[in-house]
Amino acid sequence: MTNANWNDANRVMRMDPGPRDSFVVTLVDGKRVSVEPVDAYEQALNRATVLARRIKRPVKLLPMQAAELIGLMGLKAGDMTTPSADDAETRQLVVNTCREAILESNDASVRREAHGVLVGMGETL
């Protein structure tokens, strides 16, 4: 974990992924910029570094478990089965990220968690 002043511009604040993390979320000013499978952590870190330099603002990179990601989005797993029109974009982001994790992750626990999220959402593979 980087211990730096959050107010410093051009800085990436990050935590290394833990063994149960399945996703990595990139935030700027508390707003979600991207969500990717945790296997793409290094690529996300590289993009965050470039972004921080370009926009001259701090960027935060947070590894998360699926349940944390759904909570960050202000949803409950059950809510994802019948989204409102406003939630449709968020739902599709979660579905796409989980499918990508299942197809591309080398970590069986990441694939298992992503599969569990999709099943809980009523999605088919």
Image (cartoon, helix red, strand yellow):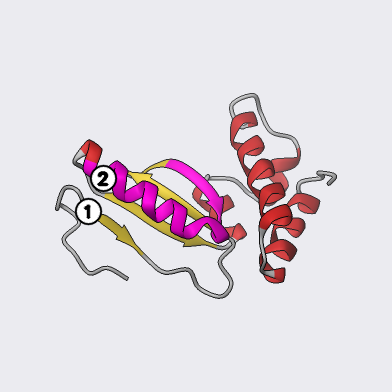
Amino acid type, label 2: Ala
CA–CA distance between discs 1 and 2?
6 Å
Q: Secondary structure at mark 2?
A: helix
Query: Relative to 107, is 70 above or below?
Result: above
Q: Which of the labelled discs sits on residue 52, or is there none?
A: 2
**Is residue 29 something one can see in this rendering?**
no
Q: Would residue 121 appear left or right of 89 to someone viewing this image? A: right
Q: What predominant SS class does the magenta segment belong to? A: helix
Q: Earlier in the sequence, mark 1 or mark 2?
A: 1
Say which quarter of the image contains residue 31.
top left
Q: Residue at x 65, y 38 (%)?
A: 91
**Is residue 11 something one can see in this rendering?**
yes
Q: How many marks?
A: 2
What's drawn in magenta, residue-wise?
33-53
Amino acid type, label 1: Arg
Q: Residue at x 39, y 55 (%)?
A: 45
The location of residue 26, given as percent across then percent down, is 41, 48
Q: Tell me if label 1 and label 2 are in contact, CB under 8 Å.
A: yes
Query: Residue beneath label 1, please?
Result: 11
Residue furthest out toward the top: 85
Mark 2 surroundings: few (<14), some (14-19) or many (≥20) residues within 10 A: some
The location of residue 9, given as percent across then percent down, is 16, 48
